[in-house]
């Protein structure tokens, strides 16, 4: 059961939702693929929109549903098809302008992460960084403090912020809920778990 939002202090925490991936392994624009009656991207986007972040940003590719009606400031991925690090850099740069004490980075292709996990990340955030851990792997959603913004906006390549998470405190997440939809069979697994 999710704790009430009043127990978790979201003051000064911005959200960056990465929704600009190339979907190469999926074989087509995965974020619009139907899952439980709505596009894949909307599962994470709607769950996160219901939480009281100070600001919400979504870095979007050309095949992503409009998220502005959910309270996101949409940042187009430029150039389209750029690697994950570019998405992260654009999102952090946009969020940084609002002067947040922390930025939570989430992925639009992780539809099963529950609100309680996000609450736990925010609650345990000490101002530096904290990440998710599933099956021994450190991953997003992850929360970065202001000391990491410059390094994150300077990233390039397809590794995103993984290097910045080495040694970070973690909040465990059931591996089934940490499912990242990369291939069509992952979407089938996600549908079975909804």
Image (cartoon, helix red, strand yellow):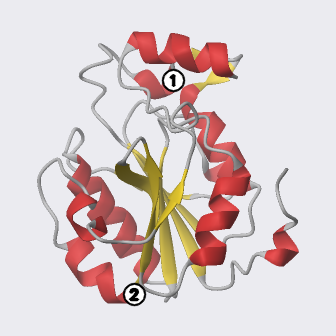
- The picture quadrant where one finds residue 3 is bottom right
Q: Is residue 58 above or below residue 30?
A: below
- Looking at the picture, tell me which residue is in the foreground, 183 or 136: 136
Q: Position of residue 164 (x, y in %)?
A: 25, 69
Viewed as shown, does residue 122 lie left or right of 3? left
Viewed as shown, does residue 68 lie left or right of 96? right
Residue 108 appears in the rendering: yes
Point 19% across, 45% down: residue:
82
Q: Position of residue 1 (x, y in %)?
A: 85, 50
Viewed as shown, does residue 79 lie left or right of 91? left
The residue beneath circle 2 is 146
Mark 1 and mark 2 lie on one chain; the one further toward the N terminus is: 1
The residue beneath circle 1 is 32
Residue 54 appears in the rendering: no
Image quarter in which the C terminus is found: top right
Viewed as shown, does residue 169 lie left or right of 14? left
Q: Position of residue 46 (x, y in %)?
A: 70, 44
Point 47% across, 28% down: residue:
31
Mark 1 or 2: in front is 2
Neighbour class for label 2 at 10 Å: few (<14), some, many (≥20)?
Answer: some
**Considering the numbered disc 2 on the image, is that residue within a helix, a strand or a loop?**
helix
Point 76% across, 75% down: residue:
8
- Looking at the picture, tell me which residue is in the foreground, 52 or 120: 120
- Looking at the picture, tell me which residue is in the foreground, 33 or 169: 169
**Considering the numbered disc 1 on the image, is that residue within a helix, a strand or a loop?**
helix
Neighbour class for label 1 at 10 Å: few (<14), some, many (≥20)?
Answer: some
């Amino acid at each position: 059961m999710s704790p009430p939002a009043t127990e978790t202090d979201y003051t000064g925490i911005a959200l960056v939702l990465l929704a600009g991936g190339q979907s190469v392994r999926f074989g087509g624009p995965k974020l619009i693929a139907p899952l439980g009656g709505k596009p894949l991207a909307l599962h994470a986007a709607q769950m996160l929109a219901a939480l009281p972040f100070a600001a919400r940003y979504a870095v979007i590719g050309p095949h992503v549903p409009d998220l502005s009606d959910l309270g996101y400031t949409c940042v187009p991925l430029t150039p389209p098809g750029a690697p994950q690090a570019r998405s992260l850099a654009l999102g952090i740069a946009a969020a940084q302008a609002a002067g947040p004490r922390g930025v939570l980075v989430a992925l639009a292709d992780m539809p099963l992460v529950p609100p309680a996990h996000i609450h736990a990340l925010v609650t345990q955030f000490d101002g530096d960084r904290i990440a998710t851990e599933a099956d021994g792997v450190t991953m997003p959603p992850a929360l970065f403090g202001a000391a990491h913004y410059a390094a994150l906006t300077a990233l390039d390549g397809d590794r995103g912020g993984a290097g910045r998470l080495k040694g970070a405190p973690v909040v465990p997440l059931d591996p089934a809920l940490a499912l990242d939809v990369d291939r069509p069979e992952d979407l089938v697994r996600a549908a079975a778990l909804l």
